């Protein structure tokens, strides 16, 4: 359990974060750069002092313990391996400092190396390793210490895309195999969605929303959360509904109530200010059909192989609307006029302050 507050000077960095992480959970803390993720991990590890709050690990209060007694292990983005030590020495260092015997260290290092499949690298120096191998060693060094909690600070950010994908699977396997409690920090929404049993989305030192990846994805509490998860992000259309005239105001335009037929059937709160629709949730209206839909023009097209993203301009809206279509079907051409719509279930409604209605 983490309940903390922290400022540097007058600037509050962690504004009052309250997290409950279950034993054995893989909790991902995701948020934009500078939102306080590393500071939070450093508070838990004991590398920074709390201004107020408490940290409990299991049934022990940890925030008053010195770092070495908290039995947490941190893995950093830049690996922080000792360059003059071999892989085995790096991994066993904490146990050596703790005065363990050579046999115990060899056994612990061997077991961690086996889990991480780096047994053949034990005699190498870090400079003779690839980025992915170095990160495995850094994780191995944490495993050897048998911590109660693993703290990962953007451990995959220095790796290329293919290796990141591979290491994500390694981390999931590791979590399953050793049943560890993991608090994992990243700015990358894909890592958050794929790794977390739960996600806490952090913004300017506060938790915006926490829940399973799909809870956050399907029921974002506000526009910020809606836009943060998913790529391309959720489209946000500024709208207002004029019940008396039965018209929509979208951007600068007044349009017929039938334009968004899915929404016209909803009991809409007066306070609606925006509609969020994910790129994959749009449907194209058959050009011969009588129903309306939102008229837009295909501006440019991104081919992703399995799908295409149509960036469509909407008269009166500055930002283009992203529409994902399967690559296998007929792909509209640049400059083509379309009508798009979305089912009521796929429309997220937000009020003036961006909160979900
Ligand atoms: N030791 C420090 N002294 C002053 N400001 C700091 C210190 N550490 C971090 N900060 C500031 O706190 C904010 C959050 O930093 P950090 O926790 O590293 O963010 P994140 O890891 O989410 O990118 C940043 O604005 C950063 O400049
Ligand atoms: Mg950071």
Image: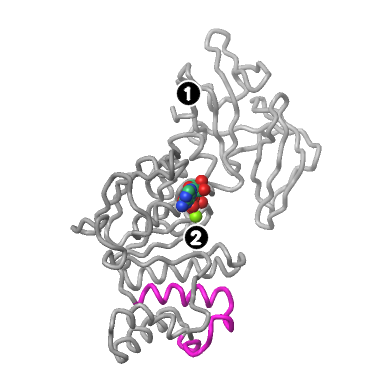
For label 2, being within 8 Å of ligand 2 is answered: yes
Image vertical order of residue 341 relative to residue 55, above or below: above
Q: Label 2, on which residue?
A: 154
Q: Label 1, on which residue?
A: 266
Q: Give coordinates of residue 42: x percent, y percent.
A: 39, 57
Q: Is residue 193 among what the camera can see?
A: no
Side (left or right) of 98 relative to 237: left
Side (left or right) of 322 relative to 194: right
Range of the magenta residues? 119-144
Residue at left 57%, top 12%?
246
Side (left or right) of 263 relative to 57: right
Q: Which is in the foreground here, disc 1 or disc 2?
A: 2
Tell me the crowding category of disc 1: few under 14, some 14 to 19, or many 20 or more residues within 10 angstroms, Cα based: few
Residue at left 50%, top 87%?
121
Side (left or right) of 296 relative to 81: right
Q: Give coordinates of residue 103: x percent, y percent.
A: 30, 92
């Amino acid at each position: 359990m983490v309940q903390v507050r922290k400022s540097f000077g007058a600037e509050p960095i962690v504004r009052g974060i309250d997290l409950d992480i279950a034993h054995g959970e893989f909790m991902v803390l995701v948020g934009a750069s500078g939102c306080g993720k590393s500071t939070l991990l450093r508070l838990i590890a004991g590398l920074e002092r709390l201004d107020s709050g408490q940290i409990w690990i299991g049934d022990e209060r940890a925030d008053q313990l010195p770092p070495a007694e908290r039995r947490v292990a941190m893995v950093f983005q830049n690996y922080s391996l000792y360059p003059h030590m071999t892989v085995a020495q790096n991994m066993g260092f904490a146990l050596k400092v703790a005065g363990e015997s050579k046999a115990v260290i060899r056994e612990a290092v061997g077991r961690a190396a086996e889990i991480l499949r780096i047994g053949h690298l034990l005699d190498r120096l870090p400079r003779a390793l690839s980025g992915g191998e170095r990160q495995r060693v850094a994780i191995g060094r944490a495993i050897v210490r048998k911590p109660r909690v693993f703290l990962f600070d953007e451990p995959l950010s220095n790796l290329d895309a293919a290796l990141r994908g591979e290491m994500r699977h390694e981390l999931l396997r590791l979590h399953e195999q050793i049943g560890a409690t993991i608090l994992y920090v990243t700015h990358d929404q894909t890592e958050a969605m794929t790794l977390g049993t739960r996600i806490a989305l952090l913004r300017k030192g506060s938790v915006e929303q926490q829940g399973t990846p799909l809870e956050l994805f399907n029921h974002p509490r506000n526009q910020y959360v809606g836009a943060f998860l998913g790529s391309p992000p959720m489209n946000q259309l500024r709208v207002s509904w004029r019940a008396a005239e039965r018209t929509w105001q979208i951007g600068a335009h007044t349009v017929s109530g039938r334009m968004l037929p899915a929404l016209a059937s909803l009991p809409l709160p007066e306070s609606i200010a925006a509609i969020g629709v994910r790129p994959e949730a749009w449907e194209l209206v058959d050009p011969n059909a009588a129903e309306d839909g939102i008229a837009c023009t295909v501006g440019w097209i991104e081919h992703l192989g399995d799908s295409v993203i149509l960036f469509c301009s909407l008269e009166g809206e500055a930002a283009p609307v992203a529409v994902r279509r399967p690559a296998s079907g007929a792909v509209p051409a640049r400059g083509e006029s379309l009508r798009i719509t979305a089912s009521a279930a796929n429309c997220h409604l937000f009020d003036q302050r961006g909160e979900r209605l």
